[in-house]
Amino acid sequence: MTPLLDRRRELDLITAALEAAETGGSGSLLVVTGGIGIGKSALLRALPALAERRGTQALTASGAVLEQDFAFGVAAQLLDPLRPGALLDLPDNDPHGELLALVADRSTQRPLLLLVDDLQWADPPSLRWLGHLAKRLTNLRVTVVVAVREGEPGAEEPRIHDITDRACHILRPGPLTPAGTAALVAAAFGRPADPEYAVACHEATGGHPMFLTATLTALLPTGAPATAQAGTVRAPHLAALRDRLAVALRSQPGPVQELAKALAVLDDGTDPELAGRLAGLDETGREEAARVLHRLGLLAGGPELAFVHRAVRDAVEELMTPAEQEDIHVYAALLLHSGGHPAERAAAQLLAATSCQDNWAVQVLRAAASAATRRGAPEDAARYLRRALLGSAPSGTDRAALLVDLATIERAFDPAAAVRHISQALLLLPSAAQRAKAAVRIPPSLLGSCPRPTVEAVVELAAEFGDPALLTGDDRELALRLEARLRHVAVIGPGRLPLCTARLRELGPTPSLCTAAERELVTVLLHGTTMAQGMSAAEVAPLANRVLQYEPASPEHTHTALPLLTHTLIAADSLEAIGPWLETARERARRDNATVPQALVAVELTHVMLARGRLTQARAHAAEALELGVADWATLQSMTAVVMLAIESRDTELARRLLAFRREGADHGYRPSSLQLIRGSSAVQRGDLPTALEYFLDWGRSAERADWRNPAVFPWRAWAAGLHYRMGDTHRAHDLIEEEYARAVAWGTPVAIGRAQRVKGALTTGERGIELLRESAATLEESVNGMERARTSLLLGRRLLRAGLAEAETQLRLARDQALGCGAPWLAEGAGRELQNFASSTASVAVAALTRTERRVAGLAAHGASNKEIAEWLEVSSRAVEKHLTHAYRKLNVAGRSQLVGMAHLLPGGGTAAGRP
């Protein structure tokens, strides 16, 4: 049973009235009034027990809407306990007198408490009788408490006022206090309420008993309450409360219902004048209707009009038919639009009304989309434009323009939908210029995965525009952008990638980079040249950095060919400027709340950190990209950095996630799939070398067909050479790595050359192998890639260790430090194991150099014997023991007994636990 809370004042007044009737014979009338659900009935339900404790007999009755035609129905409920059937034989001439006499007579025997709930719905004869009774209470031992719901039409009738005007007290229960709310929450869940949760419940319901009780009832099945849940309970979870409110609203006159509907359609905190206009009410009618809703307890206080709880809005919407809702939303949108309100407010109304397809509605929705884009809400903007499409003709330039605008926004969070809508627009636009403007909105990386007709349409457009050098103005810009898309590595046909070098040379040694289109084309040509190795890194890097200097650090670059610039600069081992540039772009993408640019910039940063050998940071950026859903829409080529991270970091979980990503068919059958590299890497980790080799060789054959020749991008020959060597095919291993090395030298970057030198050294035995590894270490000193340096240092340290050279320790320690610094624990562990082997080997040699007596003394000391014990056991002096130990420390290169203990396994310790001989 719900406890009665925060009603001490009301109970005190009622108790005083009962006492006056009991002791002084002076009865009274008290009226409990307020809006729906404020707790009037709960207060009345608590009074019979209070009366019984005082020896007063409580009689109860309740009015009902459907029982108002039953004469004396409420009176019968009250008086039947006193004399069953008392109302069956009432005299026609004075029925009220007979009933008053009955009450007066019984009150002389025992004080009476008469309780009438919902008095506004009592039948007229009962109301007249209660009016007569109210006039005579001063001489009777009778206390009458009636509850009246404010705002109900019946509550304002004269017969009700005839009763309530004679009340000695008007009681208006208020909302629960925060402490009362906490107590009710504790009672609902059967344990003390969490303070934060109780506060959340109070804020969500305003302490209103009806809303609070309904909320707690809905939350009970969820078990332990969570703070965030209190404000999120919505229909249908509060269906019973919604239905109760709907019943209350249906009994209201038309103006009240119309104002409630207007408020339900408009936002909370609505301007009263606007709500009145929408409801079709003048100022007087609006104020009266608002007064009724406020008295019902459905409106919050304040100058603006707002419902006290979401359930009230749900109940009002229940009153409206779908046609009514459609009409009122359209009218609300028109009023907001014509009144100069923000476009998004009017557009929100149009989203709920799909029938309105007028030109003004489309204008409102487009204006709202622009506003949403400015505030960094692309998904809201897309909703407005999708709604605008409903009002546009199925064909024509207007619809095409909407599709292009929608696609431009969708690029920020749904690239697939963007491409689809641009493809549709291309079919509707009449002129080549219009189609070209639409086509260049397709991100080049996605054009290759478009349906073949879309790609062919772009090819035809480029042919129609012709040579950009012969064009000027916008036509030239469009022609350059179209060319950039068709030369993009994701689109360009077999055998055409090497042509990028010739085209780049046509532009001259310092091509113009003043416009975005020029920069985009040069970026594509630089990348194609890099992949096909048509120039050296020394030629590519300066021009790529010039492009970066001209290009603003904006997240919008992800919708163009500019992400290829990151690939090019990494391949050219030129990373100084690209990292800070991408960080700036990322911050702007976060500010704009653009999911796709955020994810793609995170992938680019993954690539940069991987190129620097910083695996920890690379993993963090990759995790951000995956969390943003990049695997749901990006092409495999766009995710190359994440693929390489899975391979380089031996991350089996990341590899598993990527292998679940299937987009291989997007490459039209001849480009290599990065998934083959992941499968090969996974096979290596499983120890399945033949399968791994087949995957790498198959990928390499595809790469050659696609003219992907640069070893700085994908060092697949180095990987395959290592596998050939481990499987015993040294001849083929040397052939592959020699080709890799020749291409690396031609490209000219320290990483590519140093990596090839390392593999050559690994495959070469003897002094020449060590010499090649030293060359690799020297070459990689010029690179920022710490992981490549760690790999070379580890391999060189191992070879030096096998050769018995003391320099091995220096290289192994360097490898361990470099591996730990770049986040490659498996390399650090390998270096650590080799250092232990080195220490053991060095210690064994040193122990062998000890004399027999020195070895005996050192062994006893290492196993815990003191100098005195050693002297006694060997029957020598303590001075002699100290002399032998000093010589042993020097030969073993240890500082004292603490370090000597670590070599105990190499020294004799005797035949007892104490080390005694």
Image: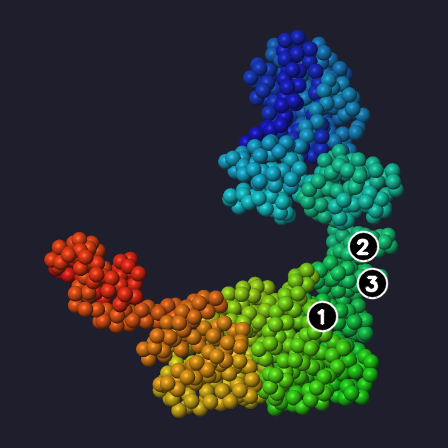
Asked whether residue 914 is in view, the answer is: no
**Residue 518 image-quadrant placement:** bottom right
Residue position marked by numbered label 2 in the rendering: 342
The reply to whether discs 1 and 3 touch (Cβ–Cβ < 8 Å) is no
Q: Residue at x 80, y 57 (%)?
A: 343
- Of badges 3 and 2, the one in the foreground is 2
Q: Residue at x 79, y 68 (%)?
A: 392
807 is higher (above) or lower (below) than 742:
above
**Mark 3 crowdedness (10 Å alpha carbons): few <14, some 14-19, many ≥20:** some
The x, y position of residue 449, in whole percent, is 63, 78
Between discs 3 and 2, the one toward the N terminus: 2
64 is higher (above) or lower (below) than 367:
above
| Disc 1 to disc 3, C-alpha distance | 32 Å
Residue position marked by numbered label 1 in the rendering: 552
Between discs 1 and 3, the one toward the N terminus: 3
**Residue 826 image-quadrant placement:** bottom left
The x, y position of residue 865, in whole percent, is 19, 55
| Amino acid type of the residue tagged 2 in the rendering | Pro
Viewer-side residue, 18 vs 591: 591
Taking the image as shown, residue 120 lies to the left or right of residue 187, namely: right
320 is higher (above) or lower (below) than 789:
above
Residue position marked by numbered label 3 in the rendering: 363
Q: SS of the residue at dot 3?
A: helix
The reply to whether discs 3 and 2 touch (Cβ–Cβ < 8 Å) is no
- Point out the residue furthest to the top here: 24
